[in-house]
Image (cartoon, rainbow, N blue to C red):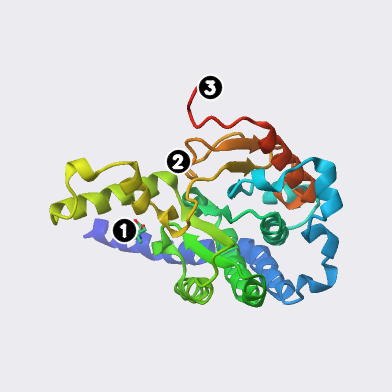
Amino acid sequence: MPSLIRSILFRLLLIPYFFIANLVCFLLSLPKILRFNKLKASQDDDDNGERDEGSYVVGKEELRQTGLQRELMPRHVAVIMDGNRRWAERAGLMTSQGHKAGAKRLKQFAELCFGLGIHTVSAFAFSTENWGRNKIEVKCIMSLIQYQLKSKLKDLHREEIRVSVIGNLAKIPESLHRTIQEMEEATKIYKNRHLILAIDYSGRFDMLHACKSIVKKAENGLVREEDVDEALIERELLTNCTEFPNPDLLIRTSGEERISNFFLWQLAYTELFFTPVLWPDFDKDNLLEALVSYQRRERRFGCRV
Ligand SMILES: *[C@@H]1O[C@H](CO)[C@@H](O)[C@H](O)[C@H]1NC(C)=O
């Protein structure tokens, strides 16, 4: 049957084609793979040497000059850390270096906040939508998160910071999962400073998850309709790990003025602060500016006065 032979021949011809296509793909991604390895190597030279102590604390005099009042500090500050990629592009650096600079900035940001008496800092580190990014970048972000968590354990103990990671953790690498569990376990004794990292988090996922859990409890006769109130829902949300689940202030950098599926329920009465500054550039002065803006606002929680 000539048509069968033709079809077989045709398939055979495809084999070298696939082989060549794969080879070309591999060669094209080679620079990225090499860059990724370079990043891993550069992670080993830690930032201790570059650390400028003054930028990690707000002095008494400095605080007085801003007019900030300690008793009016937010208890929970959330941040959407945007602009790492753009920052790297502008500086002529690799995307991975932008994320690395962003991670360093988060450490400084959290230390500053805790020093000012803020109890909870939550950071949108990796959104569910980020899975759509290039695989190597995702891998790089995951490895950066793992590296940061592991290498900062000593600091967390010294500063008595509790760490929680929230999100749909089903898709993250197994080894990162283990690191997260170890960190959470090791730091859960600390009560006054809480760092929450949202990884593969989405506000809608959080609410769906809470609904499912409540329905399940109802099916088992543990919850009746009249028991369902805001407090019950709040207890089922992933932010139930902190005493202050609803942020007082949300900061989003890099000029985006959206919530982008970060906390949805929790942001109902949150003050929003948007700034064009790219996240790796968001320094102490920028934070103080956000806090001053927060303290100037009159918070009404939906009530007219
Ligand atoms: C907190 O919320 C998660 C997610 O819904 C749930 O699995 C967990 O049981 C809750 N924890 C408490 C103490 O209610």
Disc 2 element: loop
Percent position of residue 30, x then y: 64, 66
Residue located at (46% from left, 43% from top):
266
Q: CA distance from mark 1 to mark 3?
A: 83 Å
Percent position (x, y) of residue 174? 44, 73
Looking at marks 3 and 2 on the same chain, the residue that comes earlier in the sequence is marked by: 2
Q: Earlier in the sequence, mark 1 or mark 3?
A: 1
Q: Which residue is mark 2?
A: 264
Q: Is residue 71 left or right of residue 26?
A: right
What amino acid type should be assigned to the residue bearing mark 2?
Leu
Q: Which mark is residue 305?
A: 3
Q: Is residue 183 left or right of residue 227?
A: right
Packing grade of label 2 (10 A; few <14, some 14-19, many >=20) is some
Q: What residue does disc 1 label? A: 6
Q: Nearer the viewer, mark 1 or mark 3?
A: 3
Quadrant where the image shows the N terminus: bottom left
On whether ligand 1 comes within 8 Å of the CB at mark 1, the answer is no
**Element marked by disc 3:** loop
Tell me which residue sits at (65%, 31%) in the image.
297
Query: Which percent across, then down, holds residue 14?
Result: 42, 61
Foreground of the two, 241 or 132: 241
- Is 152 situated left or right of 55 in this image? left
The spot of residue 196 in percent (x, y) is: 54, 59
| Circle 3 crowding by C-alpha within 10 Å: few under 14, some 14–19, many from 20 | few
Residue pictured at 61% horizontal, 48% vertical: 79
